[in-house]
Amino acid sequence: MLIRILAILVGIIAGFIVITFGDLILHQFINIPDGFNQNDKKALEGFIAIIPLQYLIIMVTYWLLSSFLGGLMASLVNRDGWRNSSLIVGVILMIGAIANITIIQHPKWMLIVSVIGYLPFAFLGGKIISMIIKPKN
């Protein structure tokens, strides 16, 4: 039980690291106006609405990469229970993405891709480790 909890925590942390670094890198390419208040929800939603499509695609890509890496890391920690650990990480990261998308309006396609993509990517990350490193039992 403890190993499952540790695996899930490691996976979630790995996913958050990918998202954080993805955001930091992407913000270097997006021109944020001087004096922009990112705590103003309406201003933030207006800004997201004018972000070029290629940047939104990059954003969704590293969101899904976070789920892949989270599932992979969870599988490394809990090789015997890799499926459950990886999928739980995917569900938690997906809930975070859905909350972010619904609290701060993003294009609807980003919500659809997140709902469809997070679990398969987490599973794939876990599956790759299960094929490389066989479970203990």
Image (cartoon, rainbow, N blue to C red):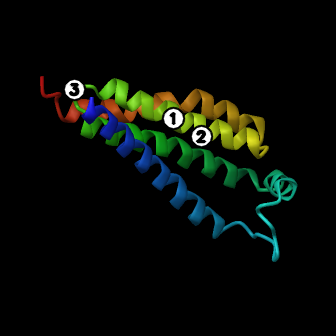
Q: Compared to 103, does 81 lie above or below? A: above
Q: Residue 80 carries which label?
A: 3
Q: Nearer the viewer, residue 123 or 95?
A: 95
Quadrant in the picture for residue 110: top right
CB contact under 8 Å: marks 1 and 2: yes
- Give coordinates of residue 12: x percent, y percent: 44, 43
- Tell me how far mark 1 sits from mark 2, CA to CA: 6 Å
Q: Point out residue 123 in the picture as x, y percentages from the top left corner.
A: 40, 29
Front-lying residue, 87 or 51: 87
* Element class at badge 2: helix
Q: Are marks 3 and 1 in contact (CB under 8 Å)?
A: no
- Where residue 134 appears, x then y in whole percent? 16, 29
Residue 126 at x, y percent in the picture: 33, 33
> In the structure shown, which secondary structural element does the residue marked by tag 3 occupy?
loop
Q: Quadrant of residue 75?
A: top left
Query: As displayed, is residue 117 above or below residue 77?
Result: above
Quadrant (top left, top right, bottom left, bottom right) of the N terminus: top left
Disc 2 crowd, CA 10 A, few/some/many (<14, 14-19, 20+) = few
Residue at 48%, 45% (x, y): give it. Answer: 66
Outermost residue toward the left in this view: 137
Amino acid type at mark 1: Ile
| Residue at which label 2 appears | 96
* Pointer 1 residue: 92
Helix, strand or loop for disc 1? helix
